[in-house]
Image: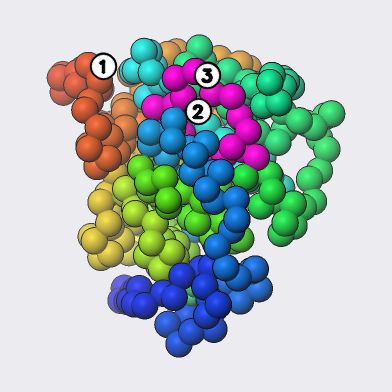
Amino acid sequence: MQTEPLQTPLHCPGTESEQAGRDSACEGCPNQEICQSRPKGPDPDIPLITEALKDIRHKVLILSGKGGVGKSTFTSLLAALIADAEVDKQFGMIDIDFCGPSLARIAGVPNEQCFGRDAKWTPVYAESNLGVMSISHMLPTTDQPVIWRGDKKTGLIKQFLTNVDWGEEGLDMLFVDTPPGTSDEHISLAQYLKPSGGYGALIVTTPQEVALQDVRKQIDFCQKAGIPIFGIVENMAGFVCPSCGGKSDIFVAGTGGGRALAEETGVPFLGSVPLDPRVGMCADSGKDFLTDYSASPATLAIKNVAVNLLTEMGIELPEYLEEPESAIEPAQQTVAV
Ligand code: SF4
């Protein structure tokens, strides 16, 4: 199937400029409406944010074109796997999907409340070296809805970037779980992270064309907003039966899936991760999927993504991620459904 070519990211006037959303280069940009309505001029808090981020060496924005692609689950597993592999380093995750926060529950810390120290918030630790900061740690109950817009969301993003006590040594890597699509939050993040450097996006999709269409918009957004893209991950690429280990394709990659999209757009393809129902079962029962099912196709696929991501970021691989191929479970037979 022929796919639409990406729009060329020419001459974005800058999301904070007076011309944002109104320039001829903005015609057809997925952010046009948002950029038109945002306040103009550089955010006066950017120097403060840049100063606060100087102790966070790498920032990975996790994006998805649409909801329901398993972005938060994937974020949690990827961060936990890298944190396990680098026990001497510190890692963090923040959830800026304020209206649908799920990262804390998936990371196994749904009910804990964060507390303050020296006027800063202390994150909740899912692992000894992996802190989590989510609005769900501030709500009286996990069922409480959050209905926020504009300035209030932007204010909390700033707080999450400046007001969390990650410890004396800061963080080696911060994973930022974002809402699906392209929104005010994404544009704000791009503005806040750019001056401190060391950041980029990892885009999560599922294999079918309807999801890939939204990813094209997301790639276009990143290019327009000047966000480097580390790569694309294809999630839910097949279903692994927990009983027999057989793999079936539930979302058919009619146009070649994430790999073909990566080739089409020139973005690195970081790997495919199959759907394994035991991931959700472990999250619900407080078990550690990566440890309990360390040789499962999903764990090995996430490990493969971690290797490719760190390589793209120019980070030396920890020993655990350099294990020989023989340690990797053979690929399961794929059957059509
Ligand atoms: S991101 Fe798009 S709409 Fe916003 S200023 Fe740049 S080109 Fe214009």
3 lies left or right of 121: left
The three-letter amino acid code for the residue at tag 2 is Gly
**Relative to the observer, which residue lies in front, 229 or 236?**
229
* Among the 4 quarters of the image, the one containing residue 109: top right
Is disc 2 surrounded by few (<14), some (14 to 19) or many (20+) residues within 10 Å?
A: many
Query: Could you say where residue 192 lies in the image, as x and y percent from the top left?
Result: 51, 51
On screen, residue 300 above or below 45: above
Left or right position of 201 against 30: left
Of 164 and 153, nearer the camera is 164
x and y percentages locating residue 53 in the rendered image: 48, 37
Q: Report which residue position mark 1 lands on.
A: 320
- State which mark lies toward you, 3 or 1: 3
| Residue beneath disc 2 | 92
Q: What's drawn in magenta, residue-wise?
A: 159-177
Residue 175: within the magenta? Answer: yes
Mark 3 and 2 residues: CB-CB less than 8 Å, in contact? no
For marks 2 and 1 on the same chain, the one whose residue lies earlier in the sequence? 2
Determine if the C-beta at disc 2 is less than 8 A from ligand 1.
no
Secondary structure beneath dot 2 equals strand
Give the camera-side residue of 228 and 258: 228
- Res 99 visible: yes
Q: Residue at x 42, y 51 (%)?
A: 195
- Vertical side of 226 occupied by 275: above or below: above
